[in-house]
Image: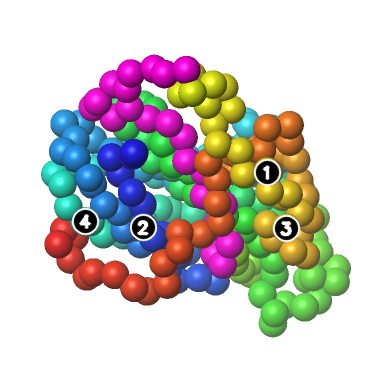
Amino acid sequence: MSAINVTQVQVLNNPQMFMTPLQFEIQYECLQPLANDLEWKLTYVGSAESDAHDQVLDTVLVGPVAVGSYKFVFQADPPDVSRIPQSDILGVTVLLLTCSYNDVEFIRVGYYVNNDYHDQFEELRENPPATVQIDKVVRNILEEKPRVTRFPCEFDTPSIPTASGMEGEAGGTMMGEDMENVQPGYGYDADAAAKMGYDQQQGYADQQQGFGFAAGHGPTEVQY
């Protein structure tokens, strides 16, 4: 059982203009004391064609962590548009919220993001200029169906390998869900799917949609 149980991630201030900071309200439970920090990271996928355009928007360290329930707001600046190919600024891309312990990633929450000109600039949609007018672009994080992928992590208690456990390490727990069902209307992108933790041959390592908690539900204190 994982020492950290992420119970909810809520996207705040969405949709919003592209250059507005991103905000995520994160709730999680710590089930055993952890001696070191949790590392939360937010990554913007600039292009499905190459990792070279990925941008780590911000990283925050939280810890040491005592047993209990926590909530905090993770805010990050928007991506640097100059590092994104012009052809990839508009349209659908991916945001990745990850958490690691001792440099081992144990959860990845992937969101599809749709960037398009604001409704009041319909003429720009119909006749887009060669250079994107970023001050007129709206960022819409498709928060209804986050892709949650969990990975094995020993935290501070090394596990004892077993025959069944060693078999599971090869591919994790396979859910076998088709990516075409993740976000109807946007289709399947193998490169974007891989960023979110998907392998076409193996599927996801212990993957699911959402967290099973109602949006907005939860405590108001940092620790309670």
Residue marked by disc 3: 181
Cα distance, mark 2 to mark 4?
10 Å
Residue under the point 85% across and 71% down: 126
Is label 4 or label 1 in front? 1
Cα distance, mark 3 to mark 1?
11 Å
Q: Assign the C terminus to one quadrant of the image.
A: bottom left
Is residue 4 positioned above or below 17 on the image? above
The secondary element bearing badge 2 is classed as: strand
Cα distance, mark 4 to mark 1?
31 Å
Residue 217 lies in the magenta stretch: no
Of labels 2 and 4, earlier in sequence is: 2
Res. 82 in view: no
Cα distance, mark 4 to mark 3?
32 Å
Q: Are marks 4 and 1 in contact (CB under 8 Å)?
A: no
Of labels 4 and 1, earlier in sequence is: 4
| First to last magenta residue range | 143-163
Residue under the point 32% across and 22% down: 159
Of labels 2 and 1, earlier in sequence is: 2
Give the left or right position of residue 84, taking residue 5 as reference.
right
